[in-house]
Image (cartoon, rainbow, N blue to C red):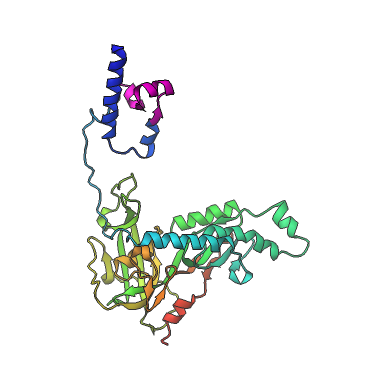
Amino acid sequence: MDDLARISSKISLNYFKLAEMPLLEGPSLLHSTLFLAPKPFFTKFSKIFISVSNMSNPTEPTSETVPQTTQNYPTPLSPPLPSISKDIELTRAMSASSKSSLFKLLRSDVLYEDEWLIAVNKPQGVYCESVLASVPCLLADNSPSGQRSAVTEAKPPELHLANRLDRDTSGVMIITKSHKVAAKLVKAFTDHKVSKTYIALCIGIAPKWDRVTLKSGHGRSKFGAWRVYAASDVGRTLPGGSVVREMVTSFEVLSVNRQGSYRELSEFQKDGANVIIVEKKAKIDGDAKKDEILVRAFPQSGRTHQIRLHCQYLGISIRGDVKYEGVYRWNGRTYEGHELHAESLSFEHPVTGSPIMLRAPLPCWASQALHSS
């Protein structure tokens, strides 16, 4: 009985020590198991035991034998997600899920098609996966009579998303029809051999610049949100093990308060005197009068939420983008999604090598921003 009491006391002591340890995450979770003692034993002692694999091997280091060090992680320069964004994003996600379940591509949505790929104009508020899932029906509906079974049943196309757009981002989306073509096109995106332009309607103080290039770091904060980091932090480790990566976007103003004009696409002229190297938090006057600014963005890297983050840093968050401080109520109207449009994609065809330029028509909000009412 004395031996059993000593064992029980030792396990209880280890339990309370473990309770004070930080929550295990990622791979460390594989080394811990929470279990209950068998019922008769549990009834007698009313204990919950925790078994940790490291405890079974006294030669392995533990929290008591390894000195604890505080990692000097980079500090994000953009603010955390607004508290109001959680509920709004949840409502939008539910609405998009319902809309996506009913979505069907039309022939009028197709921007380009050949035997290797198809490009479509994705609408706002629809998930990419739903666009991809509707392609087989579109291809079958447009097959000559009598060939439908051969195209869709005998050998269905191997469809892949070559690029992805956020739920509320509209514009050019490419779907490849074979594994080989998908691999080539994805590599072109990864190697930054695809030129992209976006159109965004922003709310903020009208910028003094006509064109500007923003260079910063990009990464996930300890809370899992994408944030802007200093350019000098590129390469440094973040909580969770990821690293800060370079993020570069060029912008040009198309109109302010509906005063402006649409400019045809051209290669962005880099102006060395108008490059912002991000090293500190931006100073934004929250009380200043807000304007409607239509901008074209040229992302030179392919980071998640890149344009949205850089617009936020510049103090001209995209209208409707509640995740990055964009207004969702403006001039008496509530906006159900952010106003960002994938305007164009330019690349060499993965099979023929021919230059391809794909453009999606401007959405209504962009057209309206170019004309005063």
Residue 43 magenta: yes
Q: Is residue 233 above or below residue 122?
A: above
Give the x, y percent position of residue 76: 27, 56
Q: Is residue 93 above or below residue 179?
A: below
Give the x, y percent position of residue 3: 30, 12
Give the x, y percent position of residue 255: 37, 80
Q: Quadrant of residue 115?
A: bottom right
Residue occupying image coordinates x 42% and y 68%: 338
* Residue sitting at the far bottom: 373
Q: Which residues are magenta?
A: 33-59
Front residue of 50/198: it is 50
Residue 285 magenta: no
Residue occupying image coordinates x 54% and y 64%: 99
Q: Going by the image, does 126 lie left or right of 266?
A: right
Give the x, y percent position of residue 40: 42, 21
* Residue sitting at the far front: 43
Q: Quadrant of residue 319?
A: bottom left
Front residue of 50/206: it is 50
